[in-house]
Amino acid sequence: MIGDDVAARLKWSAAKVSRIETAKTFPTVRDVEDLLKLYRADRTTAQRLLELRRGAAQKGWWEEYRASLPPETMELIDLESEAMEMRNWEPQIVPGLLQTEQYADALFDSLQPVVLIPPETQRDRAEVRMQRKRSLLLEPRPVSFFAVFEESVLRRQFGDATVMRRQLEHIVELSELPHVEMRILAQDTPPLMPTGPFLYLQFPDFPATVYLEEFFGSRLLEDREQVFAYKRAFDHLLAMALDEAASRSLIARIIEERWK
């Protein structure tokens, strides 16, 4: 059975199968169980392989949140841990990796009228967002992160004025890290391509992929032509956005005008 067959039968991405086969991704217990079932392994073999998996390495920090996260988010976090560069476009909210805990909490609260999230799940998802930021941006070997977002994001309120002021200050603090580049798309910018938020991930050893968030869930895009189109879209957004100095100045002005 070839990798494409495995991916189709387990409803995985082909890239995920390839990363497991080449030892670039450490499979979860559920991944191993699914593979054992697919290959109809006998009980003795299954137990031996699961024991090997448990002893091979410690689980990723995100494993303890499995019950609170959709499978697509689990796969995204796994991918992020291997990425060397990430490019995030956000037209409506502060990019997740730049959020404060208070802003994230207020954001999840605002979703309650639309998507009912149990309190413990909401808490876990906010914690995951903060841990993602720490592991990707604040560790000794951080990922290169580029973020572009609309000026309206700075004015759209989640939480009270204190939450918003601290959030905007936090964006500036993170943007001063050498591996983080933050750009704002000014409101007077001509209309751009009609695309929602997306995250482009570049890896050292396998093809880039794009993570798309949609109303009924999220998905990973791996078609090379489509992924390249998103890369070009981000490059265009980057070219149209304010430079970093002007972006920081705009944030300072909005803090003074609206969130002081």
Image: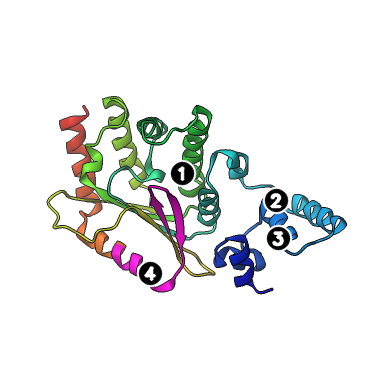
Tag 2 residue: 29
Task: Indicate whether 78 appears above or below 254.
Answer: below
User: Mark 2 belongs to which amino acid?
Assistant: Val
Q: Nearer the viewer, residue 9 or 156?
A: 9
* Mark found first going from the N terminus, 3 or 4: 3
Question: Is the C terminus in the top left, top right, bottom left or bottom right quadrant?
Answer: top left
Tag nearer the camera, 3 or 1: 3
| Crowd around label 2: few <14 · some 14–19 · many ≥20 (10 Å) | some
Going by the numbered disc 4, the residue's amino acid type is Gln
Q: Secondary structure at mark 1?
A: helix
- Distance (Cα) linking label 2 and label 3: 10 Å
Which of the 4 image quarters holds residue 34?
bottom right
The residue drawn where x is 47% and y is 35% is 126
Precedes in sequence: disc 1 or disc 2: 2
Within the image, what quadrant is residue 88 found in? Answer: bottom left
Decide which of 170, 123 is in the foreground and name it.
123
Q: Label 1 to label 2, Cα distance in Å?
A: 25 Å
> What is the x, y in percent for residue 165?
28, 31
Instruction: Identify the mark at residue 35; answer none if there is no mark.
Output: 3
- Location of the N terminus by quadrant is bottom right
Cα separation, mark 3 vs mark 4, equals 29 Å
Locate residue 107, reporting x and y percent: 36, 34
First in sequence, mark 2 or 4: give its number.
2
Q: Which residue is mark 1?
A: 133
Residue 136 relative to residue 18: left or right? left
Identify the magenta region: 211-233
First in sequence: mark 2 vs mark 3: 2
Q: Are marks 2 and 4 in contact (CB under 8 Å)?
A: no
Residue holding disc 4: 226
